[in-house]
Amino acid sequence: MSESLKNKTVRGVGWSFIDNLSSSGITFLVGLVLARLLTPSEYGIMAILTIFIAVSNSIIDNGFSNALIRKTDAGRIDYNTVFFFNLAVSVILYVLLYWAAPAISVFFKEPLLMEVMRVIGWVLVINALAIIPRTLFVKEINFKTQTKVSLIASISSGVVGIGMALAGMGVWSLVGQQLSRQLLNTVFLWIYCTWRPVWEFSMQSFKELFGFGSKLLLSGLLDTIFKEIYSLVIGRCYTSAQLGQYTRANQFNQIFSSNLTTVIQRVSYPVLSSIQDEPERLREAYRKVIKNTMLVSFACMLGMAAVAKPMIVLLIGEKWLPAVGFLQIICFSGMLYPLHAINLNILQVKGRSDLFLRLEIIKKIIAIGPLVLGILFSIEYMLWGSVLTSIIAFFLNSYYSADLIDYPTKAQVKDILPTFLVSFVTAAAMWSLTLLSLPYWLILPLQCLLGISLSVLIYERLQLPEYLEARQMAFSLLKRKH
């Protein structure tokens, strides 16, 4: 990897990480406050709404963002075409959700759903307005601006959500928080972005971009549906309170799993796309991305599984204790999410959106198994089934990407195995502290101290290249701050 590209990547990863930390991190902290003010049932209602919003947002973007990022000579007419098409789709979907709201409310046996759905649905149009400005910043690997925007939106929306919760507005506080966050995010992206739409639409541009993006649309739609379908099964077959417990556990998981995946996807895709025609350089860059990413992912996710019980009880209270078991299982599947994303990025970089779609179809057929377990037996069976399907998904993803850059599955496993073993041993030692008869407020800091100390000690002894590079990257980012 050339020095200029390496520096660009380091800056991109650094600011993208801060972006996610400022938005998701602050939102998570706000969520801790809201979790003490609201009930699991109210969180369950919001989780049901999230299913439909997430699927709709996947349709609105329809793969065009990645198509624009990949297209090195994207011009004004390309951006205008995508902007007006996405905006039209968002309005249509909002109207459909508005009409479907009564039926959705009846299906989930939650009368409040209809009214809340019709209000939260506006987030679709708001998000559609932000797609092009966000895409332009990603294409330029400019995450510094997005970080500023996220910070403003997250803090302001947090104040709105907590204020509404203290006023006794229940689930509406979650709606207010999400709507205000997306609205402020969109407004400030437009303020910082110099691009402005011009009324024009090119069918030629649409066909070219949609030719690549349509397969990503179907792939993304399948992925989103199956991510949210667990909530659908729990919401329909169990209670809103149980869905709330699952949702809360998944939100803890997303602190590291989903955010790390988002950071790596956003940065690695434009960077790898820029060297897509240089096989040796591409493979080496790709290998470094995987090794460094999984070092962080294994440490964070296995560590979280180890501290789950004292962390949840101390942060949000004993009423959320059932979420502990859910979170520990979810961490084992969540630790592989970044690896899935990186492997799939290569298919997009190489323009093989057809393989991307084929993979998603195969994986989703396999993923039906855990859903059946959830319907017939229990939520825990369903989550353990998802761990198994996550492992299978890695082998499928890496099998296809291996041929494109000559980096086989066996080599990938060999590269990430050392960091997995270090993290597993460290997490086991951290978890053993919960066996002591000590208060949770003492166990949690002891676990964190042990985990950090033991990891650093082992890695300093092993001197793994990915650890040394991650350490150097961290020092470089700290120096830039000063």
Image: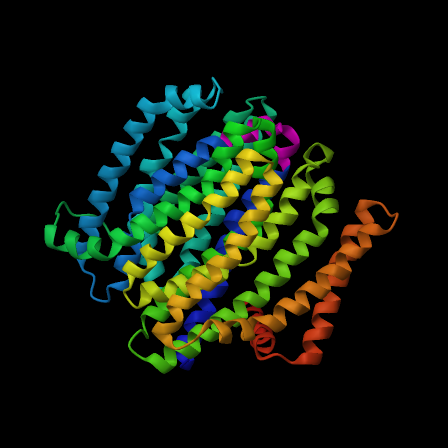
Q: Taken as a whole, is the magenta stretch helix, strand or loop?
A: helix
61 vs 416, left or right, is left
347 vs 22, left or right, is left
Is residue 19 something one can see in this rendering? Answer: yes
Is residue 16 something one can see in this rendering? Answer: no
The residue sitting at 47% across, 17% down in the picture is: 111
What's the image's color scheme?
A: rainbow
Instruction: Read off the magenta span.
Output: 33-46
Residue 220 at x, y percent in the picture: 36, 49
Of the pair 204 and 395, the residue shown nearer to us: 395
Residue 480 at x, y percent in the picture: 53, 70
Q: Number of numbered discs present?
A: 0
- Indicate yes or no whether the magenta region holds residue 435: no
Q: Residue furthest right?
A: 437
Q: Residue furthest top?
A: 111
Query: Which corner quadrant of the image does residue 314 belong to?
Result: top right
Residue 409 at x, y percent in the picture: 47, 71
Q: Can you say which quadrant of the picture contains the N terminus?
A: bottom left
Q: Can you say which quadrant of the picture contains the C terminus?
A: bottom right
Of the pair 44 and 183, the residue shown nearer to us: 44
Of the pair 166 and 98, the residue shown nearer to us: 98
56 vs 421, left or right, is left
Of the pair 48 and 162, the residue shown nearer to us: 48
The residue sitting at 25% across, 51% down in the picture is: 214
The residue sitting at 65% across, 57% down in the picture is: 302
Residue 322 at x, y percent in the picture: 68, 36
Query: Which corner quadrant of the image does residue 33 belong to?
Result: top right
Q: Is residue 294 above or below residue 187?
A: below
The residue sitting at 62% across, 41% down in the picture is: 380
